[in-house]
Image (cartoon, coloured by chain):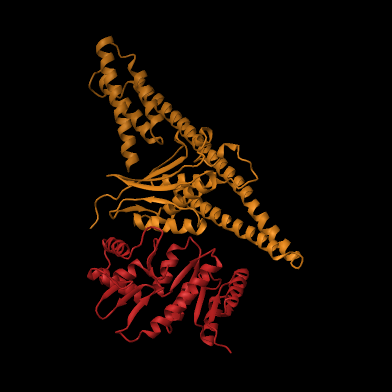
Chain colours: A orange, B red
Amino acid sequence: MLKIIKNTLISLSILAIAFGICLFIQNVFLTETLIPAVFVLAVFLIAFFTEGYIYGIISALFSVLIFNFAFSLPFFKFDFTIPENIISAVIMIIVTIITGALTTQIKRQEAIKAESEKERMRANLLRAVSHDLRTPLTTIYGASSTILDNFDIFSNEQKITLLKGIREDSQWLTRMVENLLSVTKLDGGKVKLLMNSVPLEELIDSVLRKFRKRYPEQEVIIDIPDEFISIPMDALLIEQVLVNILDNAVEHAEGMTELRLRVKVDEKRTTFEISDNGCGIDAERLKTIFTGCGGGTAPTDTKINSGIGLSVCATIIKAHGGEIFAESPKNGGAVFSFSLNNEENCDE
Amino acid sequence: MNNKYKILVVEDENNIRNIITALLEANGFQAITAESCAGGILMFNSHRPDLIILDLGLPDSDGIEFIREVRKESSFPIIVLSARSDEKDKVDALELGANDYVTKPFGSAELIARIRSALRNVRRIGNSLNPSEKFVLDRLTIDYDSRRVFLDNSEIKLTQTEYNIVALLSEHCGKVMTYSAIISAIWGYNDYGSKKKLQVNMANIRKKLGATPGNDCYIINELGVGYRMDTA
């Protein structure tokens, strides 16, 4: 519906402008020879800017009528007996059809290009993921079969070390799978977010409990408003964003002694800010930090997968219509922040 | 000497079933197993377990069907195993009468803690048939007669609604109560603003009980699902 209105408006305004120009030409140059050319151009533009053939063809017929009516003798009267009018109508319709065909083709090619770009990104992500998955799987498979094969030879300590490796890497796999689930859920925007009004305090509570399970030693300083506020969001996904960013700080902010989560609420937006005083992020890395490719400099055999975790954050926030930023302030550390829209005042 | 708690594990995945069985036996429970919904119902009828651990994704029919079948005639605690993406299934299962859910993958400590808690709370509810009895959970005491709540012997001032919510959760201690279950029990109707009303009340209760984000005090917030009263 909206498309029809838009296309009709485009067609009408181009025709109106063409008509104006023709009136101008007629009055200034006192000639009609330029007028068909102007209308051909108008029809060409309409065919180019609207979707499908229909607007172009209608405009072409319309132009012929206008030309016939206003700009050819007898002025302001229809006369369908003049063969040149009919010929110009045929020409215009041919122009329209060819333009329509060409633009449709161009548009289709652009879509194919965008699709293949997306496909390429997906393939890259898949490749990165399969590589990242292989490392923990190697540990799990290797450690468990080593224990099974040498059960009586190993000391208890040796077994415990191997088993701890299995546990750690399977926890890592769990997080990876959760992130991938979210990405596939949101990819292409086919799945709607499960939007619910979530009290800020409950969200932060849940995030902290999850985070603490993983890193019991790491303290997080919380700074949130006292009053009750609830924000529309897909709770599980936003929880994942916060956990990912906090995780990222623990894994990558070397030398960090302070991890802080601050929430600020203004009239329209709620802004979440996670800051640490660790080693910071270098400028090159900052540019691509949310795109998942990590600048390509990361050694590929370590579990440097923050790329995926953070690109998942970006995808989730984007799906919420919010914005996410990463900064590395001059006085050190890193700051991640994102904002969500507040509830419109329509409750109760 | 068979006074161990009998726990029925309904899970089709061989490895997971083995892990749970080993875990249960190591912790002094007796485990019986089934691989399908139909098998589970058969085992349930012939063994009458004290608790059921149920995987929702079973080969023959949905675990939800199992809950429906079992809940017809008993109130044995059911702990549901679910994957993260089954948010709706989780709520459905709880609303049909499951007591708790554990998200896959789970740690052994977590599962055992949930089982212990569920069994403890069955005992508690079984013992408190006397209505004048007080509810005691660690430092929290609820006097149902005088409708008062105490934390370490000092009274927590709650409004009528707040008290009703706390009392409701305590009657189902250990069980996850979904938002809509609480709302219909407290207000009797469930409309657009009810959830917000519940959340505001809950924020106040949690504050009064001394909860800060990340540190629960007796009422545990299950994000997107509901609330549960338990020791943290």
Tell which residue pokes out farthest to the front in this image. B153
- x, y percentage for residue A192? 41, 53
- Say which quarter of the image contains residue B172: bottom left
> Is residue A95 among the parts visible in the rendering?
yes
Q: Residue at 54% of width from left, 47% of height from top?
A: A251
Whether residue B17 is situated above or below residue A236 in the rendered picture: below
> Is residue B65 among the parts visible in the rendering?
no
Q: Residue at 45% of width from left, 78% of height from top?
A: B120
- Say which quarter of the image contains residue A41: top left
- x, y percentage for residue A273? 40, 45
Q: How many marks?
A: 0
Whether residue A83 is situated above or below residue A170 in the rendered picture: above
Q: Nearer the viewer, residue A306 or A330?
A: A330
For the C terminus of chain A, give its image quadrant: bottom left
Q: Residue at 47% of width from left, 76% of height from top?
A: B78
Whether residue A1 is situated above or below residue A215 in the rendered picture: above
- x, y percentage for residue A199? 33, 56
Q: Residue at 34% of width from left, 35% of height from top?
A: A7
Tell which residue pokes out farthest to the bottom in this image. B1
Q: Nearer the viewer, residue B36 or A1?
A: B36
For the N terminus of chain A, give its image quadrant: top left
- Say which quarter of the image contains residue B223: bottom left
- x, y percentage for residue A202? 37, 58
Q: Nearer the viewer, residue A155 or A166?
A: A155
